[in-house]
Amino acid sequence: MKKNILVVDDQKALCFIIREVFKDRYNVEVAHDENELKNILKRMYPHIGIFDYHLNGHNGLELLKWAKEQCPDMECILMTAYDIWEIKKSVPPFVSILKKPFDINDLKTIIE
């Protein structure tokens, strides 16, 4: 049985790429905003959550923390174009950080 990946990012092109790369080995769901995230979590339990730090005016880290409360076993990855060292101060230890832009192989390494 395939594991579930949830991608939360407002960049549709990036979401498409992530879905295409992982769709053969994982069920990949995409949310572009907070409402879509909440709807997906009503019907799916993600094993891996990939969140953008800045999401259409929302704090992606706060959404990630909320989703982690709903899905405590979810592995969490935070993508950001911002300075990692500044963000790292506020990121819980259970979150992996991936600097944008990134090589898709770096994401594969974190996930697998």
Image (spheres, rainbow, N blue to C red):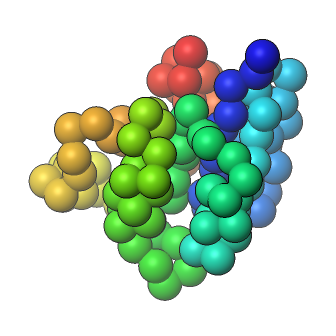
Q: Nearer the viewer, residue 17 or 58?
A: 58
Residue lying at the far bottom of the rendered structure? 57
| Position above or below: 55 against 42 | below
Apparent side of residue 90 relative to residue 61 in the rendered image (left or right): left
Compared with 53, 25 (above or below) is above
Residue 84 shown left or right of residue 39 in the figure: left
- Where 33 sits versus 95, above or below? below
- Image position, residue 107 (x, y; %): 56, 30
Q: x, y percentage for residue 100?
A: 50, 49
Residue at the far left in the pictured view: 89
10 or 69: nearer the viewer:
69
Nearer to the camera, 38 or 54 = 38
Instruction: Name the image quarter holding the N terminus.
Output: top right
Q: Please say if 79 is above or below 23.
A: below
Q: Residue at x 78, y 34 (%)?
A: 27
Would you identify the image quadrant in which residue 50 lies? top right
Q: Is residue 95 left or right of residue 98?
A: left
> Which residue is nearer to you in this view: 75 or 57?
75
User: What residue appears at the point 84 percent right and 36 percent down from the top-left corner?
Assistant: 20
User: Looking at the image, which residue is at 75% across and 48% down?
Assistant: 29
Residue 80: give x, y in percent of width and height: 43, 55
Residue 11, quarter of picture: bottom right
Residue 49 in view here: yes
